[in-house]
């Protein structure tokens, strides 16, 4: 056994020694060959192969490094593509390295395994006619790769490390830069396909991307080819899977998907300012895309944004101005995120907000959208089946409601806003038919003191740079007609009967109960922020009201007068009580006219006439002092009449 092991070790040693000898011989041969190698022939062979495979001719302005061992490569420094502008070449590379295949090299044959470009700078400039500085080079590559072309050599990979790409389109004012590019290009030297995979920096974000063409030659020639594009970054993920062609202008057709945790951030990243300052959060899109030039048509659209899901069709065009058109249908839509930053009133105050409007979003793009939804939510407002339309063109936004189920009734109308210098011009027209007045008044006017059913018509317009400015310039009309309802919070009939019996007994706590009405009519005209009550009437089974006066929209207060009456059927004397409404909208003061109450009292009415005479007033005061054992505050002496003055001088 010991003899057998010794023989085995001896044979193993001989094998290892033979291998080492072969390796040493190969290394010695490579070292010797590197000294005897015709470096000019190697350099020429490498340049010829690169030109034969890519169709591009390079010029090396710097030194050339050649190595055979331990690595077999040729490195060209300060390389630029031949045939382009010497001052701004289409492609310039700090170091272009061609790695050589070892076995052919031992037989004095120079075959490239792969090519690596270190710090390449790719420049793409596009003219107004659509041609670019790369057009002649693309045509050359297409001719080189054409079937039947003489290409005896090939290599399958080109790597780009620490590259940079700049794109300039002066006609469309587009300038983009990609930095720190690390890509691996699967060059179609063996198969017809092409693929590029790697990473790059764009607008402060690291992007993982890949692109593949099923037929690279067809794509270069403008013919139809399969195309897959994947982009993954923190703001946005995007995938396209379809076909591409470019006979005259770019054409693409396929499935597109996009996903973003924040559409607002994604839009800002790609250079599209998001409108407003609310909403545009979670976003997802899947659709069938058809691209022709700068126009994109999306069908079978399934879109989700801020929890709202809709289906339909969309088109986007950028022919000097961005235009978006869409027709969508949704089950439920919540617009609250988009309007919650619009504050008409100042925070924690009753005054109008004086913060200036930001109207830049109105001029960013053109929009034409139609939306139908089974349910719509806008803040605290709930709508049923609704058809909406939005049109934004040349800085003017027009919203229209074809028909909406709201407050158990129907709403139609339009709202428009346009930019005029630094101010906003606003126009609104709405018709609410057969709505629940309690829900309507509570939602629109912040009061729940009205019930019944009725119709509301608004036609308003204003101009201002803030909500306060709009309130100051408000013009238009508003009419409300109601029936079979009540005014909650006070009982007119009860109050009038009490004051009829005892006018000076005080109104007591009349802010409870309700005043039923058969018909309610309110007509208001607005002029420069002042609302004038042109026709305000309440007709009920037991009482009726009429109101006149004004209300200031900027100051948000009332200055109204009215008359409350018992109906003749209830009281033949037709007792009328004037009253006044004054104070802020949120908590106005409502009180009866004191002079009318005094005149209504049989005991105090003579006193009212008596106090108009000076002597009678003094006598009444003397009686009151004796009865109450208390002196009244002396009245300021009135200036003597001319007759009294003359008598005094005579005396």
Image (cartoon, rainbow, N blue to C red):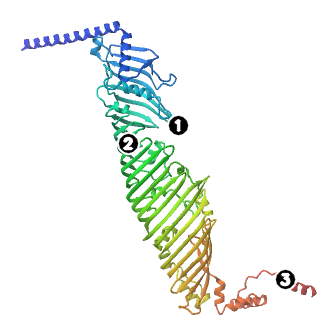
Q: Earlier in the sequence, mark 2 or mark 1?
A: 1
Q: How dense is the environment of label 1, judged by Cα within 10 Å: few (below 14), some, or many (20 and up)?
A: few
Residue 427 on image: x %, y %: 56, 61
The quadrant of the rendering that contains the C terminus is: bottom right
The kind of secondary structure element at disc 1 is loop
- Where residue 171 is drawn, which disc sits there? 1
Query: What's the residue at 35%, 18% (across, down)?
Result: 49
Given residues 432 and 614, the one toward you in this image is 432
Given residues 63 and 592, the one toward you in this image is 63
The residue mark sitting in front, 2 or 3, is 2
- Is 84 situated above or below 430? above
Q: CA distance from mark 2 to mark 3?
A: 95 Å
Residue 189 on image: x %, y %: 31, 25
The kind of secondary structure element at disc 2 is strand
- Is 494 situated above or below 287? below
Query: What's the residue at 50%, 23% (across, down)?
Result: 85
Residue under numbered circle 3: 640
Q: CA distance from mark 1 to mark 3?
A: 90 Å
The residue mark sitting in front, 1 or 3, is 1
Q: Tell me: 647 left or right of 546.
A: right
The kind of secondary structure element at disc 3 is loop
Residue under numbered circle 2: 238
Q: Earlier in the sequence, mark 1 or mark 3?
A: 1
- Where residue 484 is drawn, which disc sits there? none
Residue at far right of view: 650
- Is 406 situated above or below 135? below
């Amino acid at each position: 056994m010991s003899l057998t092991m010794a023989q085995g070790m001896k044979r193993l040693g001989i094998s290892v020694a033979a291998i080492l000898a072969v390796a040493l011989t190969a290394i010695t041969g490579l070292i010797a060959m590197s000294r005897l190698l015709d470096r000019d022939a190697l350099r020429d062979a490498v340049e010829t192969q690169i030109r034969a495979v890519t169709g591009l001719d390079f010029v090396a302005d710097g030194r050339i490094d050649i190595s055979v061992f331990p690595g077999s490569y040729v490195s060209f420094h300060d390389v630029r593509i031949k045939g382009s502008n010497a001052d701004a070449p289409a492609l310039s590379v700090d170091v272009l390295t061609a790695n050589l295949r070892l076995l052919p090299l031992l037989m004095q044959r120079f075959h490239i395994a792969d090519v690596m470009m270190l710090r390449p700078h790719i420049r793409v400039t596009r003219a107004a006619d659509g041609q670019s500085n790369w057009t002649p080079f693309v045509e050359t590559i297409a001719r080189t790769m054409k079937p039947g072309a003489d290409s005896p050599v090939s290599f399958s990979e080109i790597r780009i490390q620490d590259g940079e790409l700049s794109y300039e389109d002066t006609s469309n004012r587009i300038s983009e830069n990609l930095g720190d590019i690390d890509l691996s290009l699967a060059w179609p030297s063996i198969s017809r396909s092409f693929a590029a995979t790697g990473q790059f920096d764009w607008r402060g974000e690291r992007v993982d991307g890949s692109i593949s063409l099923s037929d690279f030659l067809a794509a270069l020639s403008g013919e139809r080819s399969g195309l897959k594009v994947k982009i993954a970054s923190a703001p946005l993920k995007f995938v396209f899977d379809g076909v591409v062609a470019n006979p005259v202008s770019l054409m693409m057709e396929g499935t597109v998907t996009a996903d973003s945790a924040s559409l607002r951030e994604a839009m800002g990243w790609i250079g599209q300012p998001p409108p407003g300052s609310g909403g545009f959060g979670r976003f997802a899109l899947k659709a069938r895309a058809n691209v022709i030039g700068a126009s994109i048509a999306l069908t079978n659209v399934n879109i989700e944004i801020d929890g709202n899901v809709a289906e339909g069709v969309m088109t986007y065009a950028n022919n000097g101005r961005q235009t978006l058109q869409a027709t969508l249908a949704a089950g439920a839509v919540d617009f609250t995120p988009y309007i919650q930053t619009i504050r008409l009133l100042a925070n924690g105050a009753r005054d109008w907000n004086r913060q200036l409007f930001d109207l830049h979003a109105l001029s960013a793009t053109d929009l034409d959208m139609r939306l139908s939804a089974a349910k719509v939510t806008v803040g605290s407002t709930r709508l049923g089946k609704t058809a909406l339309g939005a049109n934004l063109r040349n800085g003017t936004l027009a919203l229209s409601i074809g028909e909406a189920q709201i407050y158990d009734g129907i709403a139609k109308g339009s709202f428009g806003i346009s930019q005029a210098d630094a101010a906003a011009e606003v126009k609104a027209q709405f018709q609410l038919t057969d709505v629940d007045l309690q829900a309507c008044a509570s939602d629109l006017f912040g009061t729940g003191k009205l019930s019944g059913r009725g119709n509301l018509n608004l036609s308003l317009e204003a101009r201002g740079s803030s909500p306060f400015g709009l309130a100051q310039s408000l013009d238009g009309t508003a009419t409300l007609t109601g029936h079979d309802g009540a005014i909650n919070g006070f009982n007119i009939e009860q109050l009038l009967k009490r004051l009829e019996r005892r006018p000076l007994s005080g109104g007591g706590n009349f802010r409870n109960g309700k005043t039923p009405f058969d018909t309610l009519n309110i007509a208001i005209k607005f002029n420069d922020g002042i609302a004038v009550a042109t026709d305000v009437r309440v007709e009920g089974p037991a009482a009726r009201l009429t109101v006149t006066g004004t209300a200031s929209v900027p100051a948000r207060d009332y200055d109204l007068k009215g008359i409350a009456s018992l109906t003749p059927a209830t009281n033949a004397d037709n007792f009328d009580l004037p009253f006044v409404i004054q104070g802020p909208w949120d908590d106005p003061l409502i009180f009866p006219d004191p002079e009318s109450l005094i005149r209504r009292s049989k005991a105090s009415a003579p006193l009212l006439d008596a106090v108009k005479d000076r002597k009678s007033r003094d006598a009444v005061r003397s009686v009151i002092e004796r009865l109450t054992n208390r002196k009244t505050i002396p009245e300021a002496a009135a200036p003597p009449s001319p007759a009294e003055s003359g008598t005094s001088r005579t005396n």
